[in-house]
Amino acid sequence: EDTDSMAFDPRRWMWLEACEMIARAERLQRQFFVPAEASARPQWEPPVDVFADERRLVVVAALPGVRPEELEVAVGDGTLVVRGHRPLPPFARRAGLVRMETPYGRFERRLRLPAGPWLHAGSRLEDGLLVVELERM
């Protein structure tokens, strides 16, 4: 196969372009990322899963390392708000940072609820997951 046709292969070009975009994004993240441990503003949003039937809504948020006293759950005006703080582990304060993919600091997640009045039936932390149960009133 001749080398000129390989040089203009659109699949190869698209792959190289995608790799370069990822590298640029990583450079920007390293350039501007500063751990926001002391910030009062939310710095990240936890991922959530939502399960529903006719009478119940269950929201599950991934919050490993968050203690119950660092967590607030509120329901009002058709919105569920989960906010809190995940502190850096003690050993991380003494060590140099090599790579950080897990967010730390203040977080907040706001979810618009389906129509209807909802009662906050309870919340619990279970294996690093916050489980929030809502019941239709």
Image: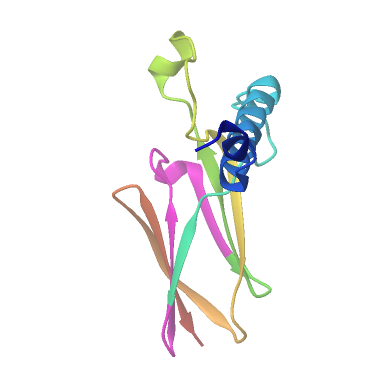
Give the residues drawn in magenta, as a range.
52-74
Residue 100 in the image: x percent, y percent? Answer: 49, 26
Q: Residue 131 vs residue 84: left or right?
A: left
Residue 57, above or below 34: below
Q: Residue 89 vs residue 6: left or right?
A: left
Residue 62 is a magenta residue:
yes
Q: Residue at x 65, y 25 (%)?
A: 33
Q: Residue 47 vs residue 129: left or right?
A: right
Which one is in front, 61 or 17? 17
Q: Quadrant of residue 89?
A: top left
In this rendering, the count of numbered labels is: 0
Which one is in front, 118 or 95? 95
Residue 114 in the image: x percent, y percent? Answer: 59, 81
Residue 129, above or below 66: below
Q: Residue at x 45, y 56 (%)?
A: 61
Q: Residue furthest bottom?
A: 54
Which one is in front, 64 or 29? 29
Q: Residue furthest left?
A: 127
Q: Residue at x 44, y 90 (%)?
A: 54
Residue 118, above or below 4: below
One can see residue 43 in this view: no
Residue 111 is a magenta residue:
no
One can see residue 22 in this view: yes
Q: Residue at x 69, y 20 (%)?
A: 31
Q: Quadrant of residue 26?
A: top right
Which one is in front, 8 or 137? 8
Residue 133 in the image: x percent, y percent? Answer: 42, 71
Residue 112 in the image: x percent, y percent? Answer: 63, 71
